[in-house]
């Protein structure tokens, strides 16, 4: 799997890593038919920092690999802690 040259919010990988460490890898990364990462750059970076050699992926059709396909998954909501308890 190879990441696309998309910007990664490197300052947020530690939050993602904390979530993966506590709850597991619940949202797979998306890859195209060439093995190029479409979504999940932050999750991949966090998993690497946690020492995970593999991450779950879902292969998608080539038509999904348009720039707009990355937008919805690039957001991570900031819920108040009391809601998550």
Image (tube, rainbow, N blue to C red):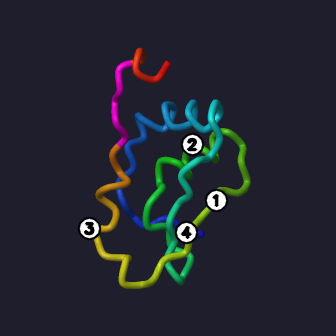
Give the label, 3 or 2, closer to the camera: 3
Residue highlighted by disc 2: 46
Residue 51 in the image: x percent, y percent? Answer: 72, 43
Give the label, 4 or 1, closer to the camera: 1
Mark seen at residue 2? 4
Query: Do tag 1 and tag 2 residues touch (Cβ < 8 Å)?
Result: no
How busy is the neighbourhood of tag 1: few (under 14 within 10 Å), some, or many (20 plus)? few
* Sequence-wise first label, 2 or 4: 4
Residue highlighted by disc 3: 68
Where on the picture, by quarter, is residue 81?
top left
Query: Do tag 2 and tag 4 residues touch (Cβ < 8 Å)?
Result: no
**As rendered, which of 56 and 79 lies closer to the eye?**
79
Report whether 3 appears left or right of 24.
Answer: left
Element on which disc 3 rests: helix
Residue 26 in the image: x percent, y percent? Answer: 58, 47
Mark pair 3, 4: CA separation: 19 Å
Element on which disc 1 rests: loop
Residue 50 vertical position relative to residue 78 in the rendered view, above or below: below
Mark pair 1, 3: CA separation: 22 Å
Mark pair 1, 2: CA separation: 13 Å
Residue range highlighted in magenta:
76-80
Residue highlighted by disc 1: 56
């Amino acid at each position: 799997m190879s990441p696309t040259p998309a910007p990664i919010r490197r300052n947020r990988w530690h939050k993602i890593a904390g979530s993966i460490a506590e709850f597991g890898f619940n949202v797979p990364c998306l890859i195209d038919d060439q093995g190029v990462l479409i979504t999940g750059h932050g999750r991949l970076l966090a998993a690497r920092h946690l020492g995970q050699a593999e991450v779950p992926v879902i292969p998608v059709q080539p038509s999904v690999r348009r720039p707009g396909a990355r937008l919805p998954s690039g957001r991570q909501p900031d819920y108040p802690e009391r809601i998550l308890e």
